[in-house]
Amino acid sequence: MAGHTARRDVEIPIDKTGHAGILRIPGGASSVVLFAHGSGSSRLSTRNNYVADVLAEANIATLLFDLLTEVEDRIYENRFNIDLLTRRLAAATDWIAAQPDFRGFGVGYFGASTGAAAALAAAADRAQDIRSVVSRGGRPDLCDRLPLVKAPTLLIVGGLDDIVIELNRTALARIGGIKELRIVEGATHLFEEPGTLEEAARLARQWFERYL
């Protein structure tokens, strides 16, 4: 049973700029999930914040933060610059590791859209540190080092998101570690249909509880 969850706004220094973030730390947490949002999204994403609340119920801490500044996000190409997004996620991971509240915590990633590629790339680069990865409506095909991903990886895709289903199936075959693809029936790319986001969050929670 989850206890009280402390929520606070933070600023993460990355590339000489402060990146706004939202931390949730449930009482008794021993693991933390960093969110890598998709193109055109931010720490304020209602969908990712909902998933973060579901993870908090399982005593999993979360960090949602802006991978891009407002100015950078206005340049469309930046949203698909996987190397840039990966470096930002890695820097946020280092920041978390340096915080006294998170010493000894298991670390996982939750990626959406292009953020999923960044999460997988960062997990590949930090195979000893990242314990699990979940992608929701992600583009793992944009990650160029899938065979190096050793962290148990769950790919969640909407059943009506035909093109992305095929991209995820192709990517799944290339991932190096434990892996699974789960399709949420009746969901489109953004999981806006009734009950679909709840199902995706449930699957993510179960995955992190098992491997994180």
Image (spheres, rainbow, N blue to C red):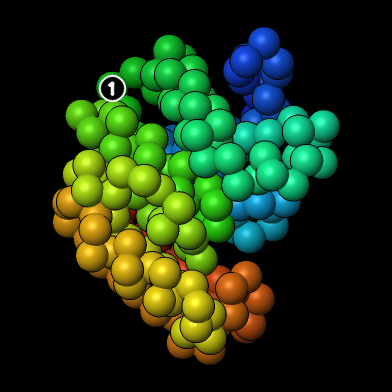
Is residue 77 positioned above or below 191 on the image? above
Quick check: 87 left or right of 46?
left
Query: Residue 37's spot in the image, x, y percent?
Result: 59, 48
**50 or 149: nearer the eye?**
149
Residue located at (53% from left, 48% from top): 115
Near mark 1 (Cα within 10 A), the count class, few <14, some 14-19 or many ≥20, is few
Residue underneath mark 1: 104
Residue located at (49% from left, 27% from top): 87
- For residue 38, say whether it is visible: yes
**141 or 124: nearer the eye?**
141
**87 or 193: nearer the eye?**
87
Residue located at (40% from left, 48% from top): 143
**123 or 50: nearer the eye?**
123
Query: Residue 36's spot in the image, x, y percent?
Result: 53, 43
Query: Residue 32's spot in the image, x, y percent?
Result: 40, 36
For the C terminus, give its image quadrant: top left
Residue located at (24% from left, 55% from top): 175
Q: The residue under label 1 is which amino acid type?
A: Gly
Quick check: 141 left or right of 175?
right
Is residue 120 positioned above or below 163 on the image? above
Quick check: 169 left or right of 12?
left
